[in-house]
Amino acid sequence: MIVVTGATGNVGRELVRLLAAAGKAVTAVSRTPAALPGGVAHHRADLTDPATLAPALTGADALFLEVLPHAHEPEALVGFAKAAGVRRVVLLSSQGAGTRPGTYAQPVRYEDALRGSGLEWTILRPGGFDSNALAWAESIRGDLTAAAPFAGTGLPFIDPADIAEVAAAALREDGHTGRTYVLTGPAATTPRERAAALGAALGAPVHFTEQTRDEAHAEMLRFMPAEVAAGTLELIGAPTAAEQAVSPDVERVLGRPPRTFADWAARNTAAFR
Ligand SMILES: NC(=O)c1ccc[n+]([C@@H]2O[C@H](COP(=O)([O-])OP(=O)(O)OC[C@H]3O[C@@H](n4cnc5c(N)ncnc54)[C@H](OP(=O)(O)O)[C@@H]3O)[C@@H](O)[C@H]2O)c1
């Protein structure tokens, strides 16, 4: 049995679907139950209280673990997995753990806890997600507008469905143990280009406005803690060469190139109509 944390989110939802479709027994973990594929069990846990995850781990051989806001005890989470006899853990970390370890201290701590655990581990370090464009859902639904800072700075955002597919491979197949994969899309896109791609998918142009850094910071505080907002703005405003580079790892694992932002937009128009 495979336990999936973050099971109702952009990555976890698709991972649960893939594992269930492959005939695996899955326990989906989140704080709030949601519609799940037939046969998938749900376990309610709050990872800020690691003991609440423990009952789900009985009889599990693998765990997909996400670094979640305010869940600050990775050693305890990994310890419960080991005590329950879990053999393999796939961690959804962040590219920033490699490129900006000082800012991304929490993913670094999760990675360290896992590497020192004696368990079989695979670490996934994605860059920004295509699904971050869902922050525009309300304004695009309202009056076909989108606003973002650093309009012309490109980053190779990744489709969460590709992260899920790599995670499913690492959970199910041998050969990924001890690997750290950097996961990106196939090409850098700018916020202005992503808004245009959404317009193309919707068949109606989206009017794009460039925000100042301060405007963006104020808006991001609605979705994330202040230190995460500041770190994110640093990354999207002044990415390093490594953060702008396309990684070969999705294609290495899946044997096909990563999906484009336009592909994500075409599959997700319902959220913007
Ligand atoms: N977005 C990016 O650009 C980006 C880049 C790099 C890495 N990441 C990492 O990717 C992770 C997953 O992203 P996503 O887009 O799939 O997330 P998401 O759509 O926001 O989903 C988060 C999932 O975690 C669950 N959850 C949240 N807090 C929890 C808690 N305290 N205890 C138990 N479950 C909890 C949520 O369900 P409930 O709310 O019902 O509990 C939901 O199932 C992020 O947390 C981040 O660490 C994201």
Image (cartoon, rainbow, N blue to C red):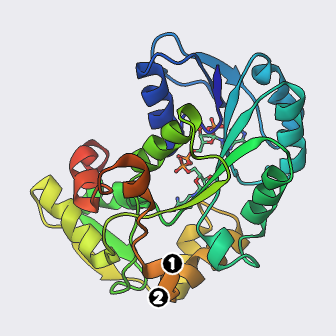
Residue in front for this viewpoint, 139 or 74: 74
Residue in front for this viewpoint, 252 or 166: 252
Q: Position of residue 252 (x, y in %)?
A: 41, 56
Residue, far left: 203
Examine the rendering and report whether any part of residue 222 can be seen.
Answer: yes
Q: Residue at x 64, y 57 (%)?
A: 93
Image side of residue 197 versus residue 222, left or right: left
Q: Position of residue 205 (x, y in %)?
A: 13, 66
Residue in front for this viewpoint, 98 or 153: 98
Relative to 124, residue 62 above or below: above
Give the number of the disc on residue 97.
none
- Quadrant of the rendered image containing residue 147: bottom left
Secondary structure found at label 1? helix
Few, some or many residues within 10 Å of mark 2 (<14, 14–19, 20+): few
**Where does label 1 land, which residue?**
216
Q: Residue at x 15, y 54 (%)?
A: 202
Please count the marks in the image. Answer: 2
Relative to 61, residue 251 above or below: below
**Where does label 2 land, which residue?**
212
Label 2 beta carbon within 8 A of ligand 1: no
Image side of residue 180 versus residue 186, left or right: right
Q: Position of residue 232 (x, y in %)?
A: 58, 75
Secondary structure found at label 2? loop
Residue in front for this viewpoint, 92 or 190: 92
Tag 2 and tag 1, C-beta contact below 8 Å: yes
Q: Residue at x 65, y 36 (%)?
A: 5
Q: The residue under label 1 is which amino acid type?
A: Ala
Instruction: Find the distance from the CA under tag 2 to the CA under tag 1.
Output: 6 Å
Relative to 189, residue 45 above or below: above
Q: The residue under label 2 is which amino acid type?
A: Thr
Few, some or many residues within 10 Å of mark 1 (<14, 14–19, 20+): some
